[in-house]
Amino acid sequence: QVQLVESGGGLVQAGGSLKLSCAASGRILSINAMGWYRQAPGKERELVAHITSGGSTNYADSVKGRFTISRDNAKNTVYLQMNSLKPEDTAVYYCNADIRISTFFKNDYWGQGTQVTVSS
């Protein structure tokens, strides 16, 4: 059983910062790509940032220059540093990871989500 547990969400004023963390645990052989997605009320879930096992990153245009994704492979953890937050960043943020649990099986796993609310 693999679990992704997110933390770090909350309420912040516009212009403020938050750092999200997501730790993977369980039967893990290796973790490939990891990412953060978000879903605002009435909208579809969208990719925020993505990082490969080698550390290559990509970001949604809306967060470039403000958000930074990073990972600690020794801790099976991915982070999202969010600066200069805007009200439109308000959403539930989900962690995602492509995890290999055996030689012949890998799967896509999701965290439970953490609420980020940015007040104007």
Image: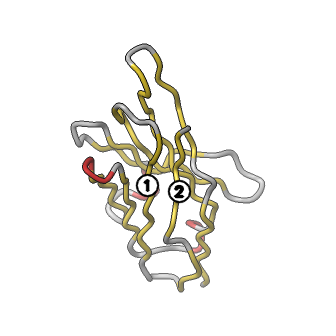
User: Can you give x and y, in whole percent of width and height, for residue 1 in the image?
Assistant: 56, 38
* 10 vs 84, nearest the viewer: 10
* 93 vs 102, nearest the viewer: 102
Instruction: Give the amino acid type for the residue marked by disc 1 in the picture.
Output: Ala
Q: Report the residue at 30% width, 52% height from top.
A: 71
* 81 vs 24, nearest the viewer: 24
Q: Circle 1: is it few (<14), some (14-19), or many (20+) Cα within 10 Å?
A: some
The mark nearer the N terminus, 1 or 2, is 2
Marks 1 and 2: CB-CB under 8 Å?
A: yes
- Disc 2, SS: strand
Q: Circle 2: is it few (<14), some (14-19), or many (20+) Cα within 10 Å?
A: some
User: Can you give x and y, in whole percent of width and height, for residue 83 in the image?
Assistant: 38, 73
Q: What is the residue that sits farthest to the left in this orientation? A: 54
How many badges with numbers are in the image?
A: 2
Q: List the residue tagged with mark 2.
A: 5
Q: Which mark is residue 23?
A: 1
Q: What is the residue that sits farthest to the right in this orientation? A: 42
In the image: residue 118, left or right of residue 63: right
- Disc 1, SS: strand
Q: Report the residue at 62% width, 57% height from top.
A: 113
